[in-house]
Amino acid sequence: MFRKLPPLKSLLAFSAASRSQSFSSAAKELYITQSAVSHQIKNLEEFLGQKLFYREGKVLKLSTDGQIYAQKVNQSIEQLISATQELIGQHDNVLQFGVSSTFAIHRITPELSGLNQRYKDLDIRLRMLSCSDVITALDLDVILYDHPIEHISYECIKLKNEVYYPVANAALANKLSPSAIEWQKETRLIDIETVDLWQDWFKEQGLELVNNNIQYFLHSILILKAVIAGQGITLLGETLIRNELQSGELVKLSDTAIVFPDDGFYFAWHKRRKNDPNIRRLKNWLTGLL
């Protein structure tokens, strides 16, 4: 029976490479050289008679057969890990949790004490995600992100849509006229560079945006701090600023929101943890937080 199985070393190398789609990352995970990973993959491809990877320029990608095989191999390895932990009475309460940076700083971190009190045995290792991260190569257990995570190693669901409202701090809001077209004359519009949310919002109102009174920032957390300080008005996600809206620190200037079809809160978990009760705990907590 075992003659029908490829070498275990080749399967482990393939599993690691398929998750990161990088031979160098797989080598680091397995504490072997990159050439050793390449050699094991080649052995596996020869055993199967199938090409598992191909390259587009410098980018390594799984073939169609490779994607199907990777899903089954990774699930099998995770079942072995789970069975072993169950047999020896071990359960991993550590969750490597990746969250987009603004939401991690402004909403998740301040609320973590509540999660820790609710689940005292849960060990959350929070990582801030940036736009430059190759998220699926970070080997995270759980991810909360503003776009779907599409990778064979992860399952992903949408928890909530995000809606964006024009907001200002309370003092500035009291000085502004009700007319959106006048805001450009009365204060500065603040936007994130390359996104131009105001352009979309004004267009939806059938109004003309004057571009000479806009200040751009490179990060949403900077915009949030600037608006709280009264430096202008901006469009921010309601979920991000829920606490400030409830306290009155920030005020909606209009009930007209803008929504982007794919933008929201996506909860993804690694398939190796799909039956882990800690994943359900974290999901339930996040659903309440959002």
Image (tube, grey):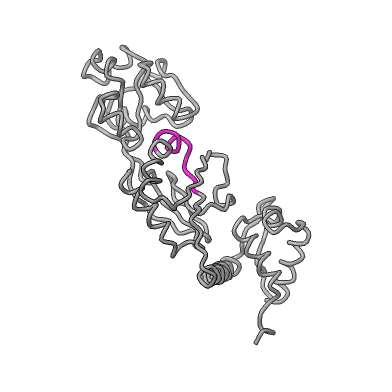
Answer left or right for 192 relative to 164.
right
Q: Position of residue 122 (x, y in %)?
A: 44, 52
Q: Vertical placement of 153 versus 111: above or below?
A: below
* Quarter of the image where one finds residue 249: top left
Q: Position of residue 125 (x, y in %)?
A: 51, 46
Q: Position of residue 89 (x, y in %)?
A: 51, 68
Q: Quadrant of the N terminus?
A: bottom right
Residue 266 shows up from this direction: yes
Residue 72 shows up from this direction: no
Q: Which stretch is magenta?
A: 97-107
Q: Please tell me which residue lies in front, 230 or 47.
A: 230
Residue 228 colored in magenta in the image: no
Seen at 73% across and 57% down, the residue is: 31
Answer left or right for 51 relative to 189.
right
Q: Please tell me which residue lies in front, 120 or 100.
A: 120
Q: Main secondary structure of the magenta part?
A: helix
